[in-house]
């Protein structure tokens, strides 16, 4: 095994050394370093004091090398490739469909709302059907919600943009080192509506195809983007076969919006001294212009036109949700009560919320807050500096106070817990519609969208860069 590996490395090095006779210094560097690596690998295997597994040692080296590029470039061994091969099996046929558009509705007499959570096959068709349906119901304005959408199929992003911009318009391009990885994607069909005022909601969870839709419609001044800066995933990967039935997944290109900006936020080519990766620094960001001359920047995801701060939930809300307590209480609540007339009219009364607080008594749950983490860091630092004993009593007093106050967290964070509990309850009565619309009355980004769409002058002012 060891001999075969050494022969393979040596042959590869010799082949590349032959190629290095060309003027290209790059090929010489490749050949030179392969030769060094082959001799190093040979000497380590021959001389190291303990027995070395050549396969494991080589895998460690390859993984470390690829990790220095980006997290998406990976070596996939023959055994790992097998996990992705087609397996034939028999099962009872059922039609199971997970919708890309779990919900769409009229927010008021003139404003429609479409929630898009994925970019799997038919995403464009689902958004189109929702748009047509809303227009038939009187929608003259639209909110497209891409918050938390991690992306998916590139062509579905193109299809969705095509609903709002004319045929033949550039949506996205990919550019790489090799010309074969350079592509341009344009709209192919007649649009549904190129005039309807449009707001797109994004947040830190909006990535990839979501960013292409938001960025493209922003570049054409076709929509106002509201929310938080998006995730910033603008890298393209392909798989290439290697010897011994293994594979290489490698980043070959980056995504660019019509204005020419790249949405990738982390700059893997410029690592810090400790090897960590940072965002593209402001000094290296380039400015671009939208169709109407608004300035936009690359290297940082999609910057919204109207910036909002997304609500941060207290850890108690998450632990109540994950522990199933909210789910269980919603089940008990709905089993004893008939459904409300509609989603908008439902709200838990103070007495009903207090009943939930009583129901929670004696039930175990634990969560860690930012304050808990800070106190722990202070303890560890004090121990390192040899003065923990002097402040131990003070820290214990603080911890006791925090622990006592935590007993009231169900009441202190009532608003956030109540929102989540109402959504769980309404999902029992109205399914997906109930769960989504339960949050409408607490949704600040959505309220901002409705307010902006109601003021044509303010909406147009943003798009005209005034």
Image (cartoon, rainbow, N blue to C red):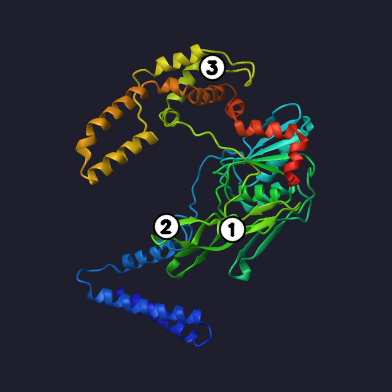
Q: Position of residue 159 (x, y in %)?
A: 70, 49
Residue to which mark 3 is pinned = 348
The residue that label 1 is drawn on is 285
Label 3: few (<14), some or many (≥20) within 10 Å?
A: few
Q: Residues within 10 Å of mark 1 (few under 14, many from 20)?
A: some
Pointer 3 or 1: first along the chain: 1
- Left or right placement of residue 369 versus residue 92 in this view: left
- Disc 2 element: loop
Q: Nearer the viewer, residue 332 or 415?
A: 415
| Residue 445 in the image: above or below residue 158 | above
Residue 160 in sight from this viewpoint: yes
Query: Depth-wise, is mark 3 or mark 1 nearer the camera?
Result: 1
**Pointer 2 residue:** 276
- Residue 430 quadrant: top right
Of 142 and 334, nearer the camera is 142
The residue sitting at 74% across, 31% down in the picture is: 454
């Amino acid at each position: 095994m060891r001999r075969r590996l050494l022969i393979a490395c040596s042959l590869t090095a010799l082949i590349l050394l032959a190629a290095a006779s060309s003027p290209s210094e790059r090929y010489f560097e490749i050949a030179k370093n392969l030769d060094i690596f082959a001799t190093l690998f040979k000497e380590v295997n021959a001389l190291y004091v303990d027995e070395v597994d050549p396969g494991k040692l080589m895998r460690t080296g390859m993984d470390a090398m690829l990790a220095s590029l980006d997290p998406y470039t990976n070596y996939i061994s023959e055994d790992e490739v097998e996990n992705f091969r087609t397996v034939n099996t028999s099962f009872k046929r059922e039609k199971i469909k997970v919708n890309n558009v779990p919900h769409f509705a009229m927010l008021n007499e003139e404003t429609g709302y479409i929630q898009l959570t994925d970019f799997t096959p038919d995403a464009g068709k689902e958004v189109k059907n929702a748009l047509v349906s809303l227009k038939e119901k009187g929608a003259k304005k639209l909110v497209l919600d891409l918050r938390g959408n991690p992306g998916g199929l590139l062509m579905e992003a193109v299809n969705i943009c095509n609903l709002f911009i004319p045929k033949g318009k550039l949506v996205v391009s990919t550019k790489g080192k090799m010309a074969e990885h350079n592509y341009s994607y344009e709209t192919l069909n007649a649009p549904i509506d190129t005039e309807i005022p449009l707001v797109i909601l994004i947040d830190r969870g909006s990535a990839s195809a979501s960013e292409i839709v938001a960025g493209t419609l922003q570049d054409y001044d076709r929509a106002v983007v509201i929310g938080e800066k998006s995730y910033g995933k603008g890298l393209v990967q392909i798989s290439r076969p290697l010897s011994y039935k293994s594979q290489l997944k490698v980043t070959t290109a980056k995504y660019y919006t019509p204005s020419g900006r790249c949405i990738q936020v982390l700059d893997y080519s410029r690592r810090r001294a400790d090897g960590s990766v940072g965002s593209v620094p402001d000094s290296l960001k380039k400015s671009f212009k939208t169709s109407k001359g608004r300035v936009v920047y690359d290297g940082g995801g999609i910057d919204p036109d109207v910036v909002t701060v997304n609500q941060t939930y207290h850890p108690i809300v998450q632990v109540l949700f994950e522990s199933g307590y909210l789910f269980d209480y919603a089940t008990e609540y709905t089993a004893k009560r008939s459904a409300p007339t509609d989603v908008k009219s439902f709200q838990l009364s103070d007495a009903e919320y207090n009943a939930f607080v009583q129901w929670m008594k004696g039930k175990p749950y634990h969560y860690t807050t930012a304050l808990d983490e800070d106190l722990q860091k202070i303890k560890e630092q004090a121990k390192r500096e040899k003065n923990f004993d002097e402040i131990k009593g003070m820290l214990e007093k603080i911890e006791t106070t925090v622990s006592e106050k935590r007993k009231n967290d169900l009441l202190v964070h009532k608003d956030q817990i109540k929102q989540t509990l109402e959504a769980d309850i309404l999902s029992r009565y109205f399914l997906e519609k109930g769960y989504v619309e339960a949050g409408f009355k607490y949704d600040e980004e959505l309220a901002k969208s409705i307010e902006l769409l109601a003021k044509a002058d303010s909406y147009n002012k943003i798009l005209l860069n005034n």
